[in-house]
Image (cartoon, grey):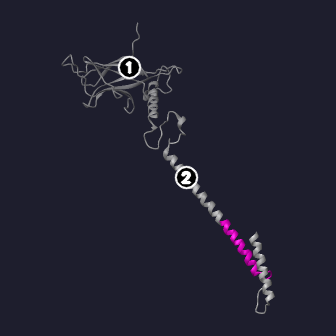
Amino acid sequence: MAVVATALTITPLFDGTKRMTITGSVAAYEKVAVTVVGVNDVTDPHVPVLPAGLVLRLSSHCGRVEYARFPAETGDVWVADGANATCTLDLNTAAIAQLFRCAAQNDTREADVLLESGTADNLYGVARLLIRNWVQNPLDPVAGSSQLQTQIDNLTTRIEEHQHDADVEGESSFPHNNLSGRDVAGVHPTIEAGVAGAALAAHNAQATADTACLNASQAQATADAAVAVTSRIQDGLEFSQVTGASTLGQVKSLLNQIVVVLNTWRQT
């Protein structure tokens, strides 16, 4: 016998009590083939009309936690099968994973099933459903795998799309899923321009400092020479003063001393 997929048949009673009957059994993380009986308009049996805005939800008894719903994703649509509406309900959700967190293999949880339409502002029916746990082989995980793969695909797409544009002047192409080109010139032009500006400012500052140091050395040498001259003139020993009583010989002797000193400085 062929394998039979998990299925639920939901029949709203439409007797004024907003009750439904549910046939079938489900487990956490399954994909469930759902048939909602007798909800389509079959005035024209060849063109059944699905109820507008039809939604199937599984929630906690208090209504604060939603475990699963259909439609859940963009592109989810009900399929008409005569008077019945069919869909595939995904019980592989984060809320159901949290509901059965640390639960044993034979544990079960109850959920409220609501058939409703926000478009028509109607609650068609409510029922209770027992969900059993399904602990899978950790070496061959199933629970959450499709959601995890979706997130991986989304991240991969975003990483591949985020790259520097080689068509923009001053930039070079650099796909971030391949870091081998992270140091290529032009990959991060704004950062590189800032680094180049800082390097130029540092070079200019060093050149200014070198010039100031040279000027200081020259000033020191000039000052030292001036000190040597003033010390010789002011000490009153090496160069004696000329007075009104000085003889011509004394003046000649003083001039000769000055010439000797000047020649010595010139040679050094």
Residue marked by disc 2: 198
Q: Is residue 216 above or below residue 5?
A: below
Q: Amino acid at mark 1?
A: Val
Q: Residue at x 55, y 52 (%)?
A: 198
Indicate which label's residue lies in the foreground, 1 or 2. Answer: 2
Which numbered tag is attached to residue 160?
A: none
Residue sitting nearer the eye, 215 or 171: 215
Q: Is residue 255 above or below residue 136?
A: below
Verify whether residue 235 appears in magenta.
yes
Q: Position of residue 140 (x, y in %)?
A: 51, 20
Q: Position of residue 268 (x, y in %)?
A: 76, 69
Verify whether residue 22 appears in magenta.
no
Q: Is residue 186 above or below residue 43?
A: below
> Is 183 on the left or on the right of 244, as rendered?
left
Q: Amino acid at mark 2?
A: Ala
> How many numbered marks have been drawn onto this rendered protein structure?
2
Is disc 2 surrounded by few (<14), some (14 to 19) or many (20+) residues within 10 Å? few
Name which quarter of the figure residue 55 lies in.
Answer: top left
Magenta segment boundaries in residue numbering? 216-238
Name which quarter of the figure residue 123 lies in.
Answer: top left
Q: CA distance from mark 1 to mark 2?
A: 64 Å
Counting residues from the start of the chain, the first of labels 1 and 2 encountered is 1
> Is 128 on the left or on the right of 149, as rendered?
left
Residue marked by disc 1: 32
Q: Secondary structure at mark 2?
A: helix
Q: Position of residue 244 (x, y in %)?
A: 76, 92
